[in-house]
Image (cartoon, rainbow, N blue to C red):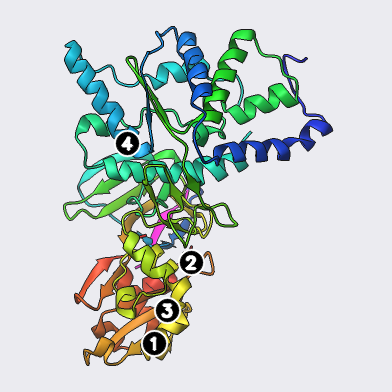
Amino acid sequence: MATRIDKLTKAQKARIPEWRDKWIAIGLKTGEADWMTFEKAVAVAYKKANLKVPKTIVRVQSPLVGAFAAPIANRIIAAKLGKKPDGAIDGDIGSAIRGAIAIDGAIRDAISDAVGGAVNDVVRGVVDGAPAYIKNEWHKLLGGQFWTGGWYWGSPSWVSYFTEVCGLKLPVDIQERAKSYQDIAQSVCWWWPCKDFIMVCNRPSNISRDEEGRLHSDIGKAIEWPDGWGFHVINGVRFDKNPELWEKIVNQTLTTEEFARIDNSEHQTIALQYLRPDRLLRQMNAKLIHKGIKGTKLYQVDNFMGTEQTEYCMWMQDWSTPREFIEWVPPAIGKQKDADLAQANAWQIPLEDYLLAEQRA
Amino acid sequence: MLTYLYNNKGGIMKLKSIEHGEIWLQPVEKLPKGNKSQHKLFIFGHSETGHHHVLESKTKFDVIEDSLKDLYLELWAGGQLIHQKHVDKHNTLTVAPGKYKVIYKQQYNPFEGIMKRVVD
């Protein structure tokens, strides 16, 4: 067995796809957590950090519960013991078990970014309005199954590849630390290591993705935990703050008026995919009045929503992708029948400057 | 309005406007007074859907917020405008050194009769 690897053999390289897929599957695992494996492995982690293993391990059924409960419990315990809250000790634990080496790319994209990152963002959004002691402490966690990729924190996918596939021999202590972290990542979701207790979250009950690996579902929540917490996503675009809009889009019950009221351009794009811009413009009896030099089309909509008012909108294609957008234009600008002027007005710049821009994405 | 920049070879180059999703960087000749901070990575407003537009540079650049809460940038080295998304993302664009005003696109709301910032 080697204590250093400078090059991979053909046979080792040939097993990268298998290892990648194995750890992606671990990262995306749903169903009841393996609590027993976690409890054994976490005890090793605490001992390696020269910390007393807490007797209390609290199981929670979604990351949101843990994000609130862990800092609150810390504060209550500190108050009862008459001391300042210790806070979570993820730094100590993390440093103790971080592996010596760092695989990734596919696993990080599939898990940490597409799934774990979305969960992180949504929880952060909810916690944003909470008292400071929650806001400042909720994120002091270790990611469990969502941290299987990435070169940091002694990535279990990397370390196991080099030790199990390539035969890398690590010092016994490092190997034990790596194994404990690997077992934890395979057994649970987020967990909060604290001095007086450990809080640990169950795995999601469901994760749905599209063919590009993005969270996606048009029949329910794209990711959901056993207590029902989760959120809706269509092709990687979240609707956590507006699940009603998600419902109208997927059920195709969104009216033209409701579409026109959508403020968020990504939600609008998704709505357009289901509604289709050509159908929407037809429903509104929109009339093409000008096509700009840069490709924007300006439409006139008479008797908008039965108001007898004339409104104007521009259709445009994204510079980087095939996505289409519809944006409304003030009547005073629309009347001038110049699509590029409508764009310049939206950007609040002179028409000359809009036409002169050379870099667009 | 065109803005010019003396490059380090003694020549003049024209600074160009940049459009990146709902963000526009407009070259300016002067920067206003305001709150100044320095960054190597700056997020242009957090996206509701998690897909932020980010300016990154190896050299620190100034971000100035004037009394009207408008943002301006001064870069001394090139930077990159990045869209933090994996698919359906705006291409990464290079930002030349110079002074810029950050403009956020607005859209008219026909129900309220007002202009509102385009968000994603």
Q: Secondary structure at mark 3?
A: strand
**Visible residue check, residue B28:** no
Q: Indicate the amino acid at tag 1.
A: Gln
Spatial CA distance of label 3 from label 4 is 43 Å
Q: Position of residue A308 (x, y in %)?
A: 22, 93
Q: Start and end of the magenta stretch?
A: B1-7
Which residue bears the numbered disc 1? A283
Whichever of labels 2 and 3 marks the residue nearer the N terminus, that label is 3
Q: Secondary structure at mark 4?
A: helix
The answer to whether B31 appears left or right of A94 in the picture is left
Q: Mark 4, residues whose alpha carbon is within 10 Å: few (<14), some, or many (≥20)?
A: some
Q: Chain of mark 2?
A: A
Along the line of sight, which residue is nearer the eye, A160 or A68?
Answer: A68
Q: Position of residue B107 (x, y in %)?
A: 30, 71
What residue is at 66 percent from the left and 41 percent from the top? A21
Whichever of labels 3 and 4 marks the residue nearer the N terminus, that label is 4
Along the line of sight, which residue is nearer the eye, B82 or A75?
Answer: A75
Check if mark 1 and mark 2 are on a common chain. yes
What residue is at 41 percent from the left and 11 percent from the top? A53
**Visible residue check, residue B109:** yes
Magenta stretch: residue A281 in it?
no
Hey, which quadrant is residue A120 in on the image? top left
Which residue bears the numbered disc 3? A315
Q: Indicate the amino acid at tag 2.
A: Glu
Q: Which mark is residue A140?
A: none
Q: Which mark is residue A65?
A: 4
Q: Indicate the amino acid at tag 4.
A: Val
Which residue bears the numbered disc 2? A358
Q: Secondary structure at mark 1?
A: helix
Q: Indicate the amino acid at tag 3.
A: Trp
Image: A164 above or below A120:
above
Check if mark 3 and mark 4 are on a common chain. yes
